Structure formats: structure tokens, C-alpha cells
Image (tube, rainbow, N blue to C red):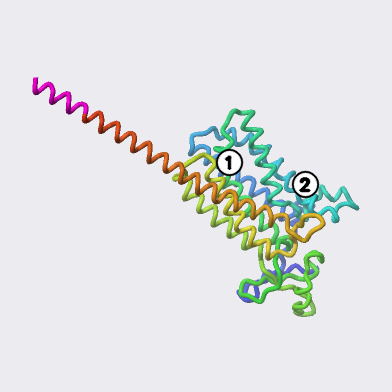
Amino acid sequence: MHYDISFPHLGITLDHVGKSVDLFGVSIAYYGIIIGMAILIGFAIATSEAKRTRQNPEDYLDMGIIGVIAGIAGARIYYVIFSWDMYKDDLLDIFNLREGGLAIYGGVIAAVLSVFVLAKVKHLSPFQIFDTIAMALLNGQMLGRWGNFFNRESFGEYTSGIQAIQLPLSAVRSGEVSGTMRDNLLTIDGISYIQVQPVFLYESLWCLVILLVLLALRRRKKFQGELFMWYLGAYGAGRFFFEWLRTDKLCIPGTRIGVSLVISAVLFVIFVPSAIVQRVMVKKRDTMRRQRRERIWLEQEEAERKKKKEKEDS
């Protein structure tokens, strides 16, 4: 198998990009290393945000451990359900995470459910927790997509654009190679390559953009849960577009409709308008409270002036 990866129009070529590294005779997948790094950085982000908002960071260490386990389990279960044909003849392969196979939406769903349970147990606000972990989740998704880079997955259809990435045909799963890709195979030094959209890169950059927006918005949020709503809505908008490009999408059984495509559309349609409406309503309530306080103050001032005038007249 050939391991080179290149962005030919950008003049970038990586000659030997393996899928794993050997440490003391043990093969460790880069995918797992990246997920591990993302988890550690996510813990740091969540606990730092907890300190900033005067919460107990230790709560997030406790919840984080359970949330990570639930998230990975949910991501795997989601992937297996919608890729059942790959696992039905070898059930033990379900537990092999070295080759990837973690679906982000499955992880997010499991994490959300675990937050509601843990918030009830610890008597905390689930919506404040969601805001606190939103940037940690985005960090995980942003870095996790680079695990897809090492695994040669999460790419799109053939393209001749400047952003195109070339991958050896032998290094990708045959089921993810479309007819258009095969019609446009490139042969270099006797090696066949596909030239495709680097969708993993698009999504990683989109997560970075959302992360920066949340960083700017976190000191201006108007209600608990707002950051998480913007995260879900904005990520759904981007993911909807990226799903159209991907050739390895998970489909609703019996159809050719991408399940993540549907979820992404639902997230955008529900949470973006909801965040806007609720933000406007909170601003309106704040304005009404301010006007009420000003009116009360003016009435008190007027009453004091009248009393003062009455004393002077008497």
C-alpha cells in the first residue's frame, strides 16, 4: 500500500503518511492519538470556562469522564447502526475503533443525554453546562477531522479545483470510490490516485470559525443555552453542505438519503431561528425592565420635588 498524500495544485506533497505509529512494539493509530488529544484539550477548555463563569471546575472533570465515555459509545453505536452491512458478519469488528467509524452526531446525542442526567443528579443547570462545553465539543470536532485525514476518509467527489487532494486508490475503502472518481483516476509512476474534495478540511475549518464566533459571543450572551444553540445551528448549516459533497455518507436504511443531512437540516431550522427569537425577546424584556426602572426613578424624583415644594410653601 502507498501512503503518500498530496495537494497537487498547492505544491504540497507528504511522502509517507501512515495510519499508525509503533511505540515499544505497540501499534497506535493516529486516529486514536488525535481523539485523545482532543479530549484532553476539551477538558482544559471546559474547566477554564467553568472557572470564568464561577462554576466548580471539578464538576466538569467528573461529568467529562462520563460524557466522553458516553460520547464515544454513542458515536460508535450510531455509526454501526447506519453501517450495519459492514459489521453483521463480524460482530467483534464493532469494537475495533482503530480504523475510525465514529459518527459525530451519535456522540453529540449521547453527550446531551448524559448532561441532562448528570445535571439532575448534581442539581445543576443543564443549559449552563451546555454553554460551558460547547467550545470543548467544537474543539473535539475540529481536531477529530484530522483523524479522518490519516485514515483517508470523509472526502468528497472528484474535483480539479485548487483545493483538490490526491489519495492512492489502494489506501481508501473501495465502497467510497464513486464512478466519477474512477473515470478520472490519475496514474503517476504506475500508481492510481483519486483526486477529491478534502471535506474533512472544510469541516475542520468551519468548526474553527464557529469556535471563534462563540469565543466572541460568550461575554455577550443573553440567556443560558444560547452558545449551545448557536453551536448546533451553525454546525448543522455547515454539515448540511458538507454532506452533499461526501461519498461515504451514512444513509437512512432503505433509502439514499443521508441521515446526517436530515439531522443537519433539522438543527439549523430549529436552533438558529430559536436563538434569534429568544435573543430578541430577552433584549426586549431587558429594555422594558430598564424603562420601568427609569419611570419609577422619575416618579420618585417628582414626588420628592413636590414634597420639597410643599415644605417651602408652608
* 280, 25: nearer the viewer: 280
* Earlier-in-chain disc, 1 versus 2: 2
Give the CA separation, mark 1 to mark 2. Answer: 22 Å
- Residue for badge 1: 130
Residue drawn at x 71%, y 61% as measured from the top left? 154
Q: Which residues fall within the magenta stretch?
A: 303-314
Q: In terms of secondary structure, where does tag 1 sit?
A: helix
Callout 2, which amino acid? Ile
On the image, the x and y values in percent for residue 117 come to 66, 33
Q: Residue at x 59, y 28 (%)?
A: 123
Does the segment drawn in magenta span residue 87? Answer: no
- Kind of residue at badge 1: Phe
- Give the image quarter of residue 300: top left
Image quarter in which the N terminus is found: bottom right
Q: Residue at x 66, y 58 (%)?
A: 146
Q: On the image, numbered disc 2 is attached to which residue?
A: 77
